[in-house]
Amino acid sequence: MGHHLEIQALLIALLGFMFIGKSQGNVHYYDFVVEEKNFTKLCSTKSILTVNGSFPGPTIRVQKGDTAFVTVHNKGSYGVTIHWHGVKEPRDPWSDGPENITQCPIPPGTSFRQKLAFTSEEGTLWWHAHSSWSRATVHGAILIFPVNQTSYPFPQPHAQETFIIGEWYKGDVQQIITSALASGGEPNSSDAYTINGEPGHFYNCSRETTYHSWVDYGKTYLFRIINSAMNEEHFFGIAHHRLTVVGIDASYTKPFKTSFIVIGPGQTMDVLVTADQPPRQYYIAASPFYDGNAPYDNSTATAILQYKAYTYNQSNSDDKSSSSSRAIPFPMLPALNDSGTAVNFSKRLRSLASKDHPVDVPKNVSRRIFMTVSINVLPCANSNCSGPNGTRLSSSFNNISFRIPKIDILQAYYWNISGVFTGDFPDEPPLYFNFTGDVVNTTMIPSTGTRVIMLDYKEVVEIVWQGTSLVGPENHPLHLHGFSFYVVGIGLGNFNNVSDPLSYNLIDPPLVNTFGLPKNGWVAMRFVADNPGVWYMHCHLDRHTSWGMDTVVIVRDGGTPQTSMLPPPKYLPPCS
Ligand code: C2O
Ligand code: CU
C-alpha cells in the first residue's frame, strides 16, 4: 500500500515536472486600451494618452518563466507602439515594439497582440510606448516575482511598493518634439516630475494629491523604483532612511547601503527599506541629476513615507512644512550636477553572483566595437535654426546620426527588402581625437544613415561606449533591447585599450539593460549575441534618441530552427 502511494507520488511529481517543463510557467492575458483621458495637474486640465485610462498605466505581474499576451487596442488618434523594456524576448523581436525598428505603428482603431516571454529576468522592469514621445504618459511597471514567491536572495519583505518617476509637460508632448525637430533647437523642458503620477508638495495645486506610502514601524519593505522620465536622470531618496540596493534591471545585486540612488531613464532599481525611524511623515524625493548645458526642469517631485501609527493633524492632511517642529524631514540629495557622485554610485553596482544567481561573464571577446557617443550640430540654411549659433542639434554613435526608416528594419531584414538599412555600422569612429578634451568642439558634422551592426549568432561582443565633449557633454543612459549586458568597466576620460581592460571587473559586474555613460567618460560592456533578431540600441534620453543617438543590432540566425528567429505573427500592423 505504502509502496503504491510512493509510486503514485513519484508519477504525479514526474507528470508535474513534465507539465512545467512544457508549459514554461503560467500564461497571463492583458488588454491594453490606449486612449485619451483628462488629467488635472499643476492647476490645469489636459488630455493625455494613457493605457486603460490610468497614469502611470497598469502593472504587469508575472513569475519568472511565465508568458504574457498583451493585446494593445489603439483607441487614440495616432499610431502607437508598446515596448517591454528589459524583457529579452528570445528569438522574438516581433513583439519588442520600437516604432519602425521592429514594427510599424498600430493604426488608430486597430489592435496588435504581443507576446512577452519571461525567461531569465527576475525583479522589476517596465513597459512604455515606443513611438515618438508618447511614452511620457504611456508607461507602467512589470513585476517579475521569483518562481515560488518567497525565494528572494534576501529576507522576505513585509510588503512591496512601486515608485515610478515620471515627467509632466503642460504642453502636448508630440507637439513639443515636433516643433523642436522643426526648429533644430532644444525641446521644451517638462513642468514637473512625478512620483506615481503625482508631483507632490512643491508644485502648485498638487499638495492634496501627493502620493503616500504607508508603512508599519519595524517592518522591511521592497521598494521598486522605475525612472520613466523623458530627459532627466534622477537622485531618489527617503529622509532619514537608508536604502539597501538589491537589484537593478531585473537582476540581483550585492546588497549595498546608501542614502540615495542615482537612476537614469530606463533603469529600474530594487531597494529594501526598514521603517526604523521615529514614526511620523518623511519625504520621498526625486530630483534631477543633470550635468549637461541645455535647459532642464529643475524641480523636485515628492511623495510621503507615512508611518501607520502616527497621527497627524488631519485637517491639514499633511504636516505643515512651514512650522519647523512639524516640518516633514527632507532627504539629503547630491547637487544636481554632481557627476562624480553619479559615477561612484555606478561603480558600487555589482551582480549578486551567488550559487542561486550566478554570473556568466564573457571572457573571450570575438568582436570589439568602440563607439563614440556625441551631441552634434548640423549646419542649417541661413544659419537660422534654433541650435547653438543658428545650427541644428543632432546626435550620433560613431559620428553617424541614425535615420529611422519608413518601413521597420525587422520586416526589411526578414523579407529582404532593400534600401531600408545597410549592415555597415563601423566598429570604430571615423576619427580618433581627444574625445573628452576641455575644449567643447562643435566642428564634427555627423553623417546620416540607417547603418546597423550585424552580429553572428553567439558572437562574443564587447562594446566600449566613449563619451565626447562635442557640443554638450553629459551623462547618457544607454539602452540595448533584446539583451542584458555586463558592465565590466567604467571610467573617466578617454578609454585606453591597453591599460583600462586590466581593471575590468570580470568577477561580479552588474547585469543591466541600461547604463549611465559618465559625462566625458567611457563604459565597457559585454554580451553574447545569442538572441537572433533585430534589436534597437539608443540613449534613453528621448531628445537624444530623436536627434539620432541610436543604432540597431541585428543578430543573424544560428543555422538551426532553435537558434533562429521565430516567424512573424499572423498579423502585423501595416507600414503605410
Ligand atoms: Cu525603454 Cu528603446 O526603450
Ligand atoms: Cu544621451
Image (cartoon, rainbow, N blue to C red):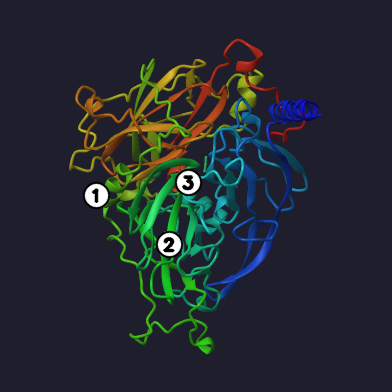
Identity, as a three-letter code, of the amino acid under mark 1: Gly
**Label at residue 274:** 2
Nearer to the camera, 550 or 385 = 550
Q: Label 2: state its secondary structure.
A: strand
Side of 381 relative to 179 (left or right): left
**Which one is earlier in the sequence, the residue at label 1 or at label 3?**
3
**Which one is earlier in the sequence, the residue at label 1 or at label 2?**
2
Could you say where residue 389 lies in the image, as x and y percent from the top left?
30, 49
Q: Label 1: state its secondary structure.
A: helix
Does the residue at mark 3 contact the one at mark 2 (Cβ under 8 Å)? no
Side of 280 relative to 131 (left or right): left
Side of 429 relative to 95 (left or right): left
Q: Give the labeled residue for mark 1.
A: 340
Residue visible at 75% across and 30% down? 9
- CA gap, disc 3 to disc 2? 26 Å
Q: Give the labeled residue for mark 3.
A: 266
Q: Nearer the viewer, mark 1 or mark 2?
A: 2
Disc 3 Cβ-to-ligand 1 distance below 8 Å: yes
Q: Residues within 10 Å of mark 3 (few under 14, many from 20)?
A: many
Nearer to the camera, 323 or 547 = 323
**Which one is earlier in the sequence, the residue at label 3 or at label 2?**
3
Identity, as a three-letter code, of the amino acid under mark 2: Thr
